[in-house]
Image (cartoon, grey):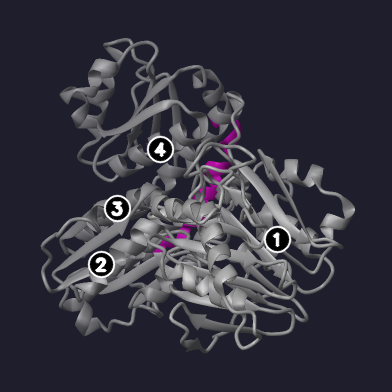
Amino acid sequence: MCGIVGYIGLDRAGSVMLDGLKRLEYRGYDSSGMVVSAGKGFEQIKRTGRVVKLEESLKEPQLGGNLGISHTRWATHGDVSEANAHPHTSSDGKISLVHNGVIENYNGMKDFLAGKGYTFQSETDSEALCNLIAYHYDKEPKDGKKNPFHEAVRKSLRHVEGTYGIAVVCPDFPEDLIGARKGSPLIVGIGKGEHLLASDVSAITHCTQNVVYLDDNEVVHLKKDNFSISTVSSKSVEAVIHKVDWDTSEAELGDYDHFMQKEIFEQPTSLENGMRGRFSDDGSTAFFGGLNLNPQELCQIDRILFLACGTAWHSCLVAEYLIERFARIPVEVEYASEFRYRNAPLDKNTLVVAISQSGETIDTLGALREAKRKGFRTLAINNSVGSTIARESDGGIYQHAGSEIGVASTKAFTSQIMICAMLALYLGRLRDLSYGDGVQIVNALKKLPEQVKEILKQNDKIAAVAKKFAKYEDCLFLGRQLMFPIALEGALKLKEISYIHAEGYPAAEMKHGPIALICEDCPSVFLVTSGETFSKSLANVQEVKARKGKVICIATEDCDIPDGLVDETILVPECHEIVKPILMSIPIQLFSYHVALERGCDVDKPRNLAKSVTVE
């Protein structure tokens, strides 16, 4: 979480960092701040609240300068206050630092440093690291043989237990910017006469498309015209420069009111981009170029384990249904945060698949590393080229969904489901799925973008439904089979952006407890599709109506919903089974969005949440 931007080079440090912080605000918006070399020495300014509060406080000289570090915070240690906001400056004034991550042994550091005369102004773990660097800097010889600033950072990091992505400056070295990472992403931007540091590539693509992705335990020493990378243990590292093919306009709102709204309406394009070039010439299967597993190896797989968190976990549940249905391979789905801390018995022919939109989710990364440590083959499905999960997996599938800024995932979720559907098709065709079945699935997937457009045309109708139901404080989402994960996702969307208590359940489980919640003030959203469970779903609706519960029914057009049975009906196009989860997701996204607007909530920056969870 949190956003870091550092700059060294031309006389525009403050303005570049401010622009970067605005682009990173989805990673944390409790407070923000910067240190910049503005004329005489370094100037520090911090404000609680959104980045705009910092912007309003900056004076013209602070928008210039040739060196600076900045930060937008998602609080971990300590409440939201200017004292706890970053950057932190050591009590002797020699070191300023911004930090993303968690220093687990910070209490021991503080006790040691307090005994050496260092004082603390905040409740954060980050200030302990800042003072530790100052302590080592004070001890370093200043004889010119080594850079004492660089050595102090390196020595301090050897004592850190936990995770960090840091940017550090020292007023004695106004031509030096140092960054380091372990567990929290950090990226170097390579420019002409300038270099940048950021926790996300989106913060720097307006300045350069040439980047270096730092690996764990690496330290970068930046000057305006050159840079060098080494490890914490002083081993030199050869930098690999990547070209970012990313459209900066994706981070702009354009004609939309919110990023979530924009990203909901971008789904026809994101789905089409994810499919492009991935179907066979005969139109009977999918294929992926980056799996790094040949068909013979894939046919030897006896089980697939999916790892993810949050919304991505829901897409894994959809994958479980689809792969077992069409490829006949047993699938398990684990919360990444749970898997990494337990000793789960896995068959040697298990394939581990990690799903993460950002490719930096700390729990998913930790679970992936645990699987690799035990010798399992790993794949990643993610939306960020160059991310840590993408680089550390044996192979992977890039979503091509485009940048997602809204904290509540929309287009990344449907893109993940589509990739999983294509993977189910591919694996199925390697086994016993027929040519004809494959062709039907490919045709169904190709129709998706246009069918999503048809649903989006109901935006005004769904907004009207949302207006009627925005007053309630509880809500149930219910569905059977493939609709159960979508019910979970619908409940998550509603609760995270409108703060309504919502739960998702398999519809048949309602009688095993949740039905106790049914009353006039607890509406239910039923996800209903045709097929063998249709009549069962209608029976569940009847049970809710018998207890005076209100019902919103989201159904496929081929469902014959009896007149007067439900309070509101939203229809999606009739479609193949494999794409139903995607199409049924669009109305719940729009419903949640409009409920949140009606309640006056900030849909792009919901309280207590950040886009990318990079701290445990």
Dot 4 or dot 3: first in sequence order is 3
Query: How far apart in space, not on screen, are marks 2 and 3 (Cα)?
Result: 11 Å
Residue 606: horizontal and vertical position, in percent?
Answer: 54, 37
Q: State the residue position of label 2.
A: 370
Query: How far apart in space, not on screen, are marks 1 and 3 (Cα)?
Result: 34 Å
SS at mark 1? helix
Dot 2 or dot 3: first in sequence order is 3
Dot 4 or dot 2: first in sequence order is 2
Can you tell which mark lies on residue 337? Answer: 3
Span of residues in magenta: 443-462
Residue 452: horizontal and vertical position, in percent?
Answer: 51, 49
The amino acid type found where label 2 is placed reads: Glu
The amino acid type found where label 1 is placed reads: Ser
SS at mark 4? helix
Dot 1 or dot 3: first in sequence order is 1
Residue 441, can we see it? no
Residue 450, above or below 345: above
Query: How far apart in space, not on screen, are marks 4 and 3 (Cα)?
Result: 18 Å
Please give left or right for residue 144 compared with residue 492 in the image: right
The amino acid type found where label 4 is placed reads: Leu
Can you tell which mark lies on residue 492? Answer: 4
Query: How far apart in space, not on screen, are marks 4 and 1 (Cα)?
Result: 28 Å
Q: Pick the residue in front: 371 or 62.
A: 62
Q: State the residue position of label 1.
A: 249
445 falls in the magenta region: yes
Q: Quadrant of residue 520?
A: top left
Query: How far apart in space, not on screen, are marks 2 and 1 (Cα)?
Result: 37 Å
